[in-house]
Image: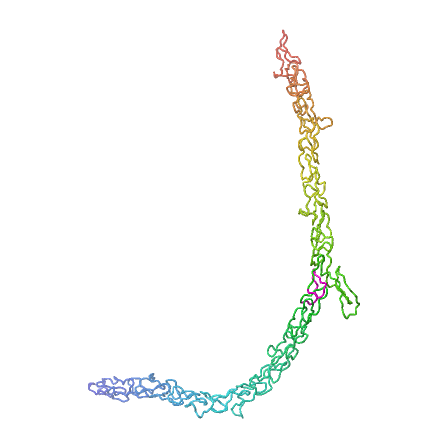
Amino acid sequence: FNCSDYPPDSDCQDGYTQPRLCPAGHYCLEGASVATANKCPIGTYYNDTGLHERQGCLVCPAGMYCDAEGLVAPAGPCTAGFYCPAGTVLQYPNATICPKGHYCPPGSAFPQPCPTGRYSGSTGVGSLDGCHLCPPGEYCPDQGATTPAGFCGEGFYCPGGIIVPRPAAFLCPLGKYCPTGAVMPLTCPSGMYQDEAGRPTCQVCPGGFYCAPENKCNGSETVVPFDCPPGHYCPNGTRTATQFPCAKGTFSNQTNLASQAGCSPCTAGMYCAEAGKTHPTAECDPAYYCSGGASSPQPRGDGGNVCPPGHYCLAGSPGPTPCPPGTFSNATGNDKLADCQPCSPGYVCSDYGLTSPTNPCTAGFYCPPGQALSTLSCPFGFHCPRGSAEPVNCPSGFFQDQVGQSDCQVCPAGFYCDLENKCEYAQYVEGTNASTFNVTSLDCTGAVCVNVSKQVTTFESIFTQPTECPQGYYCPEGTASATHFPCPNGTYGSRRGLQSVQQCQSCLEGMYCGAHGLAAPSGPCADSYYCLQGSDTPTPTDGINGDICPRGHYCPAGSTLPIPCPPGTFNDVVGSYNLSQCHLCTPGMYCDGTALLAPTGVCPERYYCPAGTAVPMSLCDFGYYCPAGSSAPKTCPSGEYQDEVGQSDCKGCPLGYYCDVEEKCGGGNYTQPQLCPSGFYCPAKTMRAEQFPCPAGTFNNRTGLGAEAECTLCSPGSYCPTPGLSAPAGPCEASYYCLQGATVASPVDGMSGDICPPGFYCPASSGVPLPCSPGTFSSAT
């Protein structure tokens, strides 16, 4: 057989010899060779055999799903939270997820709406439990609701699952209130109450009462207003009996107060320390006042305060008590009258309650502590400027001789007023039993201090009066002490009562006043100085009041002017103090005049000037000469002489004479020309007798020769061997002949003589050779 010959719903397979029925879940077209060749598609199934066409596959029923081919039955029921219309192919078909307001249990062919009283705002809800009960305070009137329809109406409450806004079964009861959306009836809060049913709000507790949850009416749940207790007040809405205590500083002993204004301020002088007081706590502390409404025994601005300056406050003070006149206080917190201090010295306190003195004490009066008015007149000898606490001593340089004065008088010229030199003053003291004295006046160095006629008991040195200026000082107006204005250096004051420096006397000439305040000069001017009028030192150097003794002068102690050195003296140094320091004029000089610093000049020629010469008057003596500057006649030197007086030089000794200073004339110290001796010659200015001897080979047997030419050649036959011969020394020796001028007895030079030549003979004293007599000869010399 061929399988193609079998009907379409048969299963023809190799090895089979006959057709078979098509299996369940499949369909077999004609000629099919394999039984499972055609499966029913997804979304269908077929639970029988022998299906021969696709249209015969059954659609998957609603509430089921068919998620594979060839199914013989649906795969299963639709999953909870989804619904499955016919032909559904998925177990979780997102396209048909259960919508909001519905629920889909397993096998749902379509969504089921949530019933009334429930709602669902979610998709995919799989059971009725997924539809929520309508929440408390809301209502849900419709099926398939996705949200509650709204809130429970006011005056009602909705416990949950409610389908109407005003459920009659849930009317708000008496004593409660139910606002819109109420879940349960609400208890009225403290300070409120409700006496009607079905009300959305509570009533405010009325003023003068309080409404507390624990205050129920006859064991019910209804809150009712109660009376406000003493010490408190209850405005509208008060929640508890003690919610609003009367504030600190107030109190109340009444009930049903509705505001703080009904509480009374704490009584003046008292304080109310805590809130809710029914009576004051106690008295205000000392140093404080409580004016009403104080909350502290030491209030600070609320119903009182610390006691202010100018006042004092005892315990329980309703207000500050002012300090009386004559006192003041700049401090706070005074608690007794003694704290008001006496008015400050020098001031008056004329009013009550002063924090500082009113005014300074009036000028001419003094005010010790505690004065209300200026009533104490300033006493004699004192002054009281404005604001004086006590009489004020006049300062040095001033005084006062009247009472009631505000200032002092200037001390008069010629007097001094020294506060350290006080006058004795008789002071009257009333009510004493001491011995008394009648005093009419007391003298204070020449000035009347005070005139009194009362009996006095004490004497005090307490003020000053003018005193005459002492010697050595001057006192212009306002002088403060005896030594305030000393006469200056260079002056002195020998009188008392001087009024100005011009009245101080200039120091005397020749004296010095070396300190200030002198009554007489200090002493004489020192040696070597002179002091003019007004010198302040024994050794002045300024040239105005004196100076060191100048050159040409001397100044002994006490000099008023330099004393000039006398004629014949000079002085070239300063500071000489004795005549002996004026030098005698230098020898050879003259000093013509006084106060010379140096000699006037050189002594003129022809005169001589010994030491101390004032004028050249000593003519040069005979035998001497006096050139310029001679201090004594000068002896002419050898070779010169002077035979006249008053000559400035010497004459030359004349020819034929010599002038030897060693050969003096008579008893004098000079020489005169002496005749030149034999053997010598004396040209002009010959100084000694033997200065110029006739030379060897000559002699001179005469005196007074003036030149060498006048010396005689030694005679022939003689010889003159030495200078200065007055005759030949002797005859020429035998065998020699001596020509004129021979110097030796046996000459051989041929000039002045010679040995006797042959053929001649020469006896002693031969001037020439004598020839041998005829008939004789001699070959010898």
Judge whether 521 appears above or below 622 on screen.
below
Nearer-the-camera pick, 580 or 763: 580
Residue 449 rendering spot, x and y as whole percentages? 74, 62
Looking at the rendering, which quadrant does residue 699 occupy? Answer: top right
Looking at the rendering, which quadrant does residue 249 occupy? Answer: bottom right
Q: Is residue 307 left or right of residue 12?
A: right
- Indicate whether residue 765 is drawn in magenta: no
- Indicate whether residue 396 is drawn in magenta: yes
Residue 367 rendering spot, x and y as whole percentages? 69, 69
Q: Which residues are magenta?
A: 387-406
Residue 26 rendering spot, x and y as whole percentages? 26, 86
Residue 332 rendering spot, x and y as whole percentages? 63, 74
Q: Residue furthest right?
A: 435
Nearer-the-camera pick, 182 or 706: 706
Q: How is the image coloured?
A: rainbow
Judge whether 320 appears above or below 597 on screen.
below
Q: How many marks?
A: 0
Looking at the rendering, which quadrant does residue 624 occupy? Answer: top right
Nearer-the-camera pick, 48 or 351: 351
